[in-house]
Image: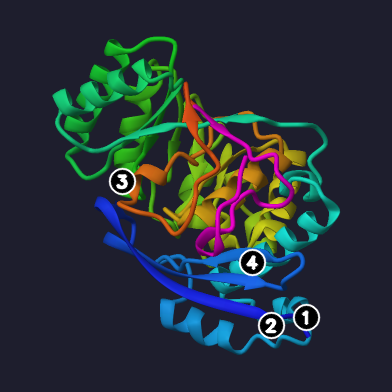
Amino acid sequence: MTRIERRAFSLALDSPLSTAAGEIDRREGIAIRVGDDPRGVGEATPLPGWTESFEGCRTALSGVSESDPRAALADLDGRPATRHGLSLAIADREARRAGVPLYRHLGGKRRVERLAVNATVGDGSIEETVEAATNAIAEGFETIKCKIGSRPLDEDLERVRAVYDAVSDVALRLDANGAWDRREADRALDALANLDVEYVEQPLPADDVAGHRALAGGPVPIALDETLADRSPDGIDSLVDAADVLVLKPMALGGPDRTLDIGRRMQDEGLGIVITTTIDAVIARTGAIHVAAALDVERACGLATADLLEEDIGTDPATVRDGKIAVPQAAGLGTDGPWGGGDA
């Protein structure tokens, strides 16, 4: 028998966050501990619009047998957050048993100590957006992600131009959260073509794959995020010609193992990949860092999200400095979440 322990948590966000599924102000999840010597920890933190509900997650986890937790993974299709929590805990335990950092256990070929991360500036006024971008550059970030789409297109284009004019030697990403129709997207991309934008994320609604396919490969690269929700791995393979970059969220994809498999296939197809969190607590956030390190992702990833939470469930081993986040080098994940400390 393998002991399984579950601890529910609810964490307030520092400020409400707008997502494609609406505004959220809390993250509710379940921390999981598998085994004792060594133990492994995981986290299941569902996100509306991306995964099963919190109650669905709690019910599914309560049904996982202690006789063979790994066998339960095959029964969790359609419950990506639940599967993520269990698969991460199993992988953490195996890495601790092997005495290696999780990213090396996951197939990382080289030592990775720090990863580039992006800073996100919200959808405030022109002055607020420029100030936030300038502050991020002063803190050492080299990639800025600007939220767009909630304002009239001309106003958003003016905000982006102002940021472009205010900062230099920075990669500028834009996230439209599926807000445009095809006509608006065409006009926006024409206007952005001379601003050296790294990519525009989810310019069209999630279900408009044909529209994204028509935009991909153009002067302004296209990234897909929400379009990946609720898709099987084979379904994600079908998006190869509909994007230049895929944004992979381990929580929404069902765990580190599935994210690694998808990420490697997409890299082989020549697509760029970015690993991001779903505004998770420390266990899942650190797991995503290990996934990015195992995939040796060179692009800045969306992993610097700890400061979006008012509090956390455990010690954070992954500090952000000069636009890079630390990759824990201790055996396993590098944090024990609510069961103790952990170190980098």
Image side of residue 48 versus residue 282, left or right? left
What residue sits right under mark 1 in the picture?
A: 71
Report the amino acid beneath label 1. Answer: Ala
Dot 2, how many residues are within 10 Å of its Cα: few (below 14), some (14-19), or many (20+)?
few
Q: Which residue is drawn at 49% across and 37% down?
A: 222
| Pointer 1 or 3: first along the chain | 1
| Pointer 3 or 4: first along the chain | 3
- Dot 2: element: helix
Q: What stretch is highlighted in magenta?
A: 324-344
- Dot 4: element: loop
Report the amino acid beneath label 4. Answer: Ser
Q: Where is residue 186 in the image (x, y as percent from the top left)?
A: 36, 35
Q: Which of 257 and 1 is in front in this view?
A: 1
Q: Of discs 3 and 2, which sits in the foreground? A: 2
Distance, label 4 to label 1, CA atoms, is 19 Å
Tags 2 and 1 touching, CB below 8 Å: yes
Q: Where is residue 166 in the image (x, y as percent from the top left)?
A: 27, 12
What residue sits right under mark 2 in the picture?
A: 75
Does residue 343 sit above or below 171 in this rendering?
A: below
Q: Which residue is drawn at 85% across and 54% down?
A: 98
**Which image quarter is the C terminus in?**
top right
What residue sits right under mark 4 in the picture?
A: 232
Q: Which of 143 and 247 is in front in this view?
A: 143
Q: Of discs 2 and 4, which sits in the foreground? A: 2
Disc assigned to residue 180: 3
Dot 3, how many residues are within 10 Å of its Cα: few (below 14), some (14-19), or many (20+)?
many
Report the amino acid beneath label 2. Answer: Asp
Q: Of discs 3 and 4, which sits in the foreground? A: 4
Image side of residue 286 versus residue 212, left or right? right
**Which image quarter is the N terminus in?**
bottom right
